[in-house]
Amino acid sequence: MKKIVIWSVASIVALLVLVQCKPNNEKSETAKPLEAVKENTNSHKVTVKEVLDANAYTYLLVTEGAKEFWIAVPKTDIKVGKTYTYEGGMEMKKFESKDLKRTFDSVFFVEGLTDPNAPVEPAKTLPKVASSTQLSKGITLSKGGISIFDLYSTKDKLAGKTVILTGKVVKFMPEIMNKNWIHLQDGTSLNGFNDITITTLEKVKVDEIVTLKGTVVLNKDLGSGYKYDILIEDAVLVK
């Protein structure tokens, strides 16, 4: 009788060992999605401590967790004490603001802030993304010029070449990396892409219609989350 009991206990122990050694497929399958989740280091949530308005930019002293740093956005109305979010950011060290007569040890230039607590509008049905070859009213291509549709649709052939573009300035960000940055639109688009970024030493105004000539550069990575499939560099105004 004792032998039977001992054998039964030994059998149970062996069975438990086999069960523990057996691969746990359910746990492995559950762990895979967790491994694939990565923090988006380009996404930031900051609280504003101080606001300094200049001619073109609004400079903000912000906190993010235990960190405190300066960011700059195109001039806009920002409230002290509010929390905002933004993506990316291009760091400039020892940046001198001539308007403020101040040199920042470090400042991150970002294209804009989002208020996460802003009222949410009712969901709307978005129109299907389409292409357009129709120029906006008041925009006429210069001699030898191309549209933004032409630029995107033939960009591979245009890499390294000089192009002429005419359009409306929808954003102007001066004196970043020793250049001025322009966002230009002309009404045309390709699969929803209707905006081209241009670097220049020229000074223009938002809503102004201008003609610019510059070099097409593809797959430009400036770091800090700023990557451009296509960029127009060193552009000059065409009169």
Image: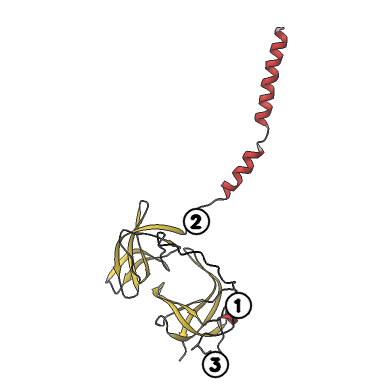
Which amino acid type is marked by label 3?
Answer: Lys
**Residue at coordinates 67% horizontally, 35% vertically from top-left?**
23
Which amino acid type is marked by label 2?
Answer: Asn
136 or 152, which lies in front? 136
Q: Secondary structure at mark 3?
A: loop
First of labels 1, 2 by sequence position: 2
Q: Which residue is mark 3?
A: 143
Q: Which residue is mark 2?
A: 40
Marks 2 and 3: in contact by CB < 8 Å?
A: no
Categorize mark 3 by other alpha carbons within 10 Å: few (<14), some (14-19), many (20+): few
Q: Which residue is mark 1?
A: 131
The percent coordinates of residue 38 (x first, y second) are: 53, 52
The percent coordinates of residue 79 (x first, y second) are: 31, 63
- Indicate the quadrant containing the N terminus: top left, top right, bottom left or bottom right: top right
Cα separation between marks 3 and 2: 45 Å
Numbered circles on residues, count? 3
**Residue at coordinates 30% horizontally, 70% vertically from top-left?**
53
- Indicate the quadrant containing the C terminus: top left, top right, bottom left or bottom right: bottom left
